[in-house]
Image (tube, coloured by chain):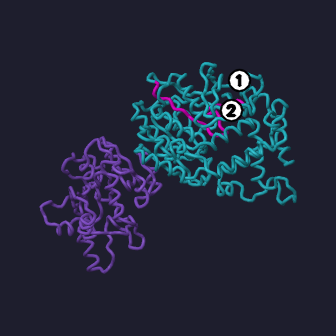
Amino acid sequence: MTELKSIVSPAIQIDDRLHEADHPSSAVAKFGMDQPLKLDCGVDLAPFQIAYQTYGELNADRSNAILICHALTGDQHVFNTHPITGKPGWWDTMVGPGLPLDTSQYFIICANVIGGCMGSTGPASTNPATGKPWGLDFPIITIPDMVRAQTMLIDRLGIDTLFSVVGGSMGGMQVLQWTAAYPDRVFSALPIACATRHSAQNIAFHELGRQAIMADPDWRGGRYVDHGSHPHRGLAVARMAGHITYLSDAALHRKFGRRMQDRDLPTFSFDADFQVESYLRYQGSSFVERFDANSYLYLTRAMDYFDIAADHGGVLAKAFRGIKTRFCVVSFTSDWLFPTSESRALVHALNASSARVSFAEIETDRGHDAFLLDVPEFFDIVRAFLQSAGKAHGLKAGG
Amino acid sequence: MALQEQTLPLPGIAPDRTGKYRTDHLLVAGMIEPGSRVLDVGCGDGELLQLLESRGIDGRGIELSREGVNRCVAKGLAVVQGDADTDLVNYPDDAFDYVILSQTLQATRQPRVVLENLLRIGRRAIVSFPNFGFWKMRLQLLVGGHMPRTENLPATWYDTANIHFCTIKDFVELCDAINVKMERSVALDLYGRPVPLNLPWWVWNMFGEQGVFLLSRGK
């Protein structure tokens, strides 16, 4: 643990990150006291704001809009340089001119989720009642709450029906929530590497991450900003644990094996002798530069609570009864966080609802993270699905 | 399992001048009313589904092989990865107007259960299969003394996926046993040509290289 402290950069731009929470480097939709976000926990959240990015042009019919829903640690910066890390957008292999999510053909929207920390209202945002960050005073949010907020954004943008809603992992959960709650507003849906509910194992891993954060003395009951601190070590450990679940045994072995980091022999210490240790520590330390610890608590909780069937009398097929939306469900063979069996259960429910569904399992050893990586077969499927849906939706092909 | 690629005029459908579609697919397509909802079980690369969609039919597919599924999805077809033996139970009753099982029945573990499921899910079923009573098959077993292998079924007995071969006669008997009505029956000869309708059953069973049947639930 002492080792982890030293690898967390001392020069983290906390101020930049906090500034981003209230004043994002994105478009912002502000909703006043008269337009509260009605949360599942019973709270009316008002005022609140949604930070979002758009790419491409909305056509005259307003029929070519695609909403991308980001994953747990993602944000709205899909296809532009990240304002804090300076890195390229997180899905710039999928989104762009000529790419499957073709910005010359579609109007692409991605919004930071409610509860996030990149400009949509969340625990890192300033609570107007106190002038301080919400911290744990922020109400508990759910995946349906995130999607409800997105519908308000889509309304604000003057879009009635989304041509497609696309997302992986937690983003895939939002896609499913969109189709279950607002089927008439979604022409096609691409839920990727996700499930209709969070499994006990997944909740367990999230709990591990949350406990790591809350066990860090710098967490200070969630009021770390008031104390000028941030639970870097706890959040880094949470990220390390999470990151392992995004990979696979085969991928880790192929990438690192038992190779040593800058040394030939063990040091007989708890230093990062192995490359895999060094890699995980790097993942942990770079994550804390851009993510808020409380936000991590809230978003993991939202995923834990997700269970579409439970909201429909325990019968998943009821959630999709009579749905007209076209689905393309994608899973990855080596994903053990959201295994193919979860996608298959979704497909069975969609079949039982007579929904138009395609389901492809992609062979890869790269684990859950494969949906973010360059996997040509996956790209081909996304491209073909959207093109065929576009034809059925009356979109003109080509740029 | 490639069948004859040649085309011929078939009742109810225009001849395919491009030669793009398999004869048995054209025959199957001709049995389906436009505007129907169709499930193709064991849809392979989706050739038949593409033909059906081009005729305004709402088609869905199930395919066992991941490669096949992904090629179908990449063609924009609504196809899911699944197994005829285990996954048909997940479909509700009367979900489709037609369920197609093309050249797949002989590869299922429980052909009878599969057939019953086809006619539970769909109001009608279209089933095609290679006829093991075909004269060339009989000749190989009779004279050669070995399990038959043909151009369309080239696998040896030890690596074939076809574990439940039957003859047209066998299939007709199964349909009778489980109260399935045969609405149309066509036997195709080695060249994919329909065997003339006015010939007796034993001729079909001898000279039909494959059988194509339109089935419905019996009373």
Region in magenta: A62-83
Give above or below for A155 relative to A381: above
Q: Is residue A7 magenta?
A: no
Q: Is residue A67 magenta?
A: yes
Give the chain ID for the cyan colour.
Answer: A
Verify CB contact (< 8 Å) between mark 2 and mark 1.
no
Query: Which type of secondary structure does the marked residue at label 1 adopt?
Result: loop
Query: If you read the primary sequence from the N terminus, does the residue marked by circle 2 or circle 1 appear first?
Result: 1
In the picture, the disc for residue A139 is: 2
In the picture, the disc for residue A23 is: 1
| Amino acid carrying mark 1 in the image | His
Residue found at x 71% / y 47%:
A207
Q: Residues within 10 Å of mark 2 (few under 14, many from 20)?
A: some
Is A115 left, or right, of B117 in this rendering?
right
Instruction: Pinpoint the chain carrying mark 1.
Output: A
Q: Colour of chain B?
A: purple
